[in-house]
Image (cartoon, rainbow, N blue to C red):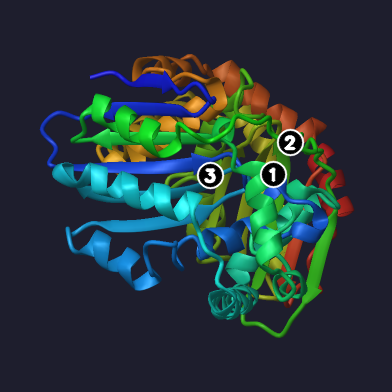
Amino acid sequence: MTAAIHRLSNGLRVVTEPMPGLHSAAVGIWVTAGGRHERVEQNGIAHFLEHMAFKGTPTRTALRIAEEIEDVGGYINAYTGKEMTAYYARVLKDDVDLAMNLLGDIVLNPIFDSGDIEVERNVILQEIGQALDTPDDIIFDWLHEAAFPNQPFGRTILGPSERVSAFGRSDLSGFIREHYGPSQMIVSAAGGIDPDAVVRAAERLFGDLPARPGLAVMPARFRGTEYREERDLEQAHVALAFEGPNVRASNAYAAQLYASALGGGMSSRLFQEIRERRGLCYTIFAQAGAYDDTGMITLYAGTGGEQVGNLSLLIVDELRRAADGFSAAELERARAQMKAGLLMGLESPTARAERLARMVGIWDRVPSLGETIARIDAVDLAGLRGFAERVAQHSEPALALLGPVSRAPDRAELARRLAA
């Protein structure tokens, strides 16, 4: 079966893809409103709003929301990202309409009871505290901040505790008015579904929403800086980032393959050289993220304070060697891993519904799997090495360090060594 897109008159898009033979389905509402859509005084509000959606509506209490989905053996969840907030459910195919009704209610009709706001505020403050106590979690927030300083894109999704402590009902309602218009919403469903029934439900639930334009978003501008915090920890945590291509760029797939070959698995260069041969760390990896107008190549490793300097320099050396040292075998291995990860993941209706929503958000259409695989296959060895050379010779890194990091080189020293 192929994906189909239906547009309501108010601009809301509905995308569906049946998966014959499945007894379950995934359905969700993806809203193009995330951390980067917040003003500085709103930092953390998108995530707070996601939490509050499950606290009750005029017709359902928080307990009833949980009971209604679990009475049919399903589950409901949500997450907030840089560019999207998602509310989704997984149910048996006969319960898709129930899931649609429930999701529509919690997204469109949250009551924002003052008591519930206080309860959830405390939950989120505990979440922030937990993140601050988890070095290999918080360091990526700091890395984003170092890469995109003083920009919405660089701010943490959770927000600072002082902001979260001050949010009230009017702040939550105001963010909905600004960003939850029908043209910012994508209803996506995959699995054991009747596409026509999903469209009818979307029309019934969302068709009366008045159309309104979305607000402009501040462009993301990579500005490599450094964040360093000396802390008494067992490990020194090192995170390094370079600007990558945006999600529509012609070299977006080269970036993904580069990160995979460099540090995407046990056979990757960083893992083999720094962990297996030298034993300098337990965890080391590289990954590529692509967004609407920017991207990031991220590298991370954790090691002891005595080894952090040597490890940091070795990472840079591997980046330099990759520019002319990537082999055809490494490219083919990375290609196989990327295609297998894509195809295996899409055997899940939840992953497929998410892909549908993201593709519609990016392209306003759903590229076929064949088209996506063809773009992966189109990256040749010259393209991979060329991308590696651009990272090594023409990029300014962002750097975040946490723990016993006094022996770690600073960003300027790493940049000089990289360009040497």
* 269 vs 20, nearest the viewer: 20
The percent coordinates of residue 50 (x first, y second) are 53, 58
Which badge, 3 or 2, comes first in the chain's sequence?
A: 2
**Quarter of the figure that contains the C terminus:** top right
Q: Observer-nearest residue: 133 or 5?
A: 5
Distance in Å between CA atoms under marks 2 and 1:
7 Å
Amino acid at the residue labelled 3: Arg
Q: From the image, which quarter does the N terminus lie in?
A: top left
Check if mark 3's residue and mark 2's residue have beta carbons within 8 Å: no
Amino acid at pointer 1: Glu
Q: Which residue is mark 1?
A: 178
The picture quadrant where one finds residue 182 is top right
Q: Are marks 2 and 1 in contact (CB under 8 Å)?
A: yes
Instruction: Look at label 2 and name its amino acid.
Output: Leu
**Mark in the foreground, 1 or 3:** 1
Judged left or right of residue 204, residue 86 is right
**Residue located beneath label 2 in the image:** 215
Q: Which residue is mark 3?
A: 269
Q: State the image coordinates of residue 297 (x, y, percent, origin top left).
A: 65, 41
